[in-house]
Amino acid sequence: MGDQLFVIGGHSGQGGIWHSVDGVDWQLASALPHLDTVLGIQIHGIARSNAGYVAVGANYAVDVAFPLIWHSLDGDHWTDVTPDPRACLSLAAVAATGSKFVAVGGVCRYDTEANPHSDAVSFVSDDGVHWQRSPSSKTLVDLDLGDVTSTGSEAVATGVHFGTWSQTFHSVDGLTWAASSEGDVPAAGFIRRLAWANGRFVGFGVHNDSAGHPHATVWRSTDAQEWSQSVVGGAKTQASGIALLGQTWVLVGGVIQSDTTSGPIVEWRSADGITWGEPRVIIPNGGDYISDVVAIGARLIAIGGVPASKGGQMWDPVILHGN
C-alpha cells in the first residue's frame, strides 16, 4: 500500500496497526487513539489514497459494537475521526475508489420481538476526515456488507445475509447501492473477501456441499454479475487469503478438524484461477492459523497466529515469508 506494508488487528485491548517497508522489520504505529473499551478494539480494514490512510473497525462491548474510523497522513500517526462513535454498528472494510474512501459494514436493528438483525451501511469521505453516511435503503435490509473493492470508478461490495449467502452490490458514489442479479453467488456459497485485479473480480470463501460441509472456494467474474465457481479444497476446508504471485494464483487456507480446533495450514496454486493443484502443507501444526496473504514482488507474506505459550484462547502473531 504505497511504499509501506500494514498489519492490522488488536493490541493490548486497543486497535493495532503495524507498518513495514520490507515485510521483515515491523513497527507498531507511534500514535494510535486511546479509547474507552469493554471487550477490546479491532481494526478490520485499511486503505490509501492521495488524502492519506484510513483504517476502520469496531469497538466491542457486550452484545454491541461501535464504529471506528481513523485517519493518518503517514501511516504512523493516527487520529480518531469517527463521525458517530456511539452508533450501534461495525465497519468491516474500506477501499479507495476514485477520489473517495468507501467504508462498509452493518448497523444494529431489532425487530418487534427484540431479535437482533443487521442492515448494511456505508460511509464516504473525500479527505478521510469528514464522512457521510448512506441513507436507509430497502436494498440493504437484513444483511451486512462484509468487504469492498474498487475498479477505480465504482465500488463493489459483498453482502452477507445471516451468514448464509452472498450477493454483490454496486455503487458509483459509495452511498447509493444497487444489488446485482438475484443469486449471483450460489445460495450455498459465502464470499469472505473480494478483490479486483487484471480486469476481473476474484472472491474467495467457502461453498457448502449437500452434507453441509464447507469447501474452500474461489469465484471469478468480469462484471460482478455472472460468476464462475471453482471448489478448490476438500470437505471441511476454508480459505483465508489469496494473492497473485507473478502469473500464479496462490490460495491459502486450512483444514477444519472440529468446531474448536483446526488442522494444518495449506496452499493451493493455479495458473488461471480455474484449475487448482493439490494442497501443499505450509504449517503442519494444528491450532495455528493464517488470516491473510499478499504478494510483494517475488515473495509471499502471510500474517497469522500461533497458540500463545501462556495457553488459553490466546495467540501470538506470526508473519511468514515464502515464494
Image (tube, rainbow, N blue to C red):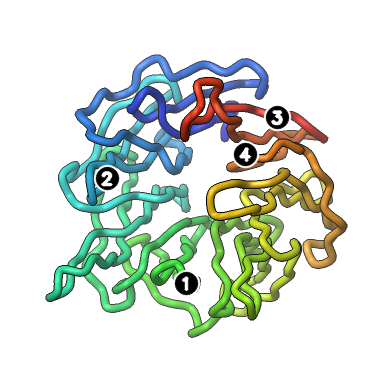
Q: Which mark is residue 320?
A: 3
**Residue for badge 4:** 287
- Quarter of image, res 265: top right
Q: Which residue is drawn at 40% across and 26% down?
A: 73
Q: Is residue 270 above or below residue 246?
A: below
**Nearer mark to the viewer, of 2 and 4:** 4
- Quarter of image, res 195: bottom right
**Nearer mark to the viewer, of 2 and 3:** 3
- Amino acid type, callout 3: Leu
Q: Residue 67 carries which label?
A: 2
Residue 55 on image: x %, y %: 40, 37
Query: Element at badge 4?
Result: loop
Alpha carbon distance from label 2 to label 4 = 30 Å
Is tag 4's residue or tag 3's residue first in the polypeptide sequence?
A: 4
Is tag 1's residue or tag 2's residue first in the polypeptide sequence?
A: 2
Position of the N terminus by quadrant: top right
Q: Which mark is residue 164?
A: 1
Q: Horizontally, is 88 left or right of 45 in the view?
A: left
- Amino acid type, callout 4: Gly
Residue found at the far left of this picture: 112
Residue 16 on image: x %, y %: 42, 27
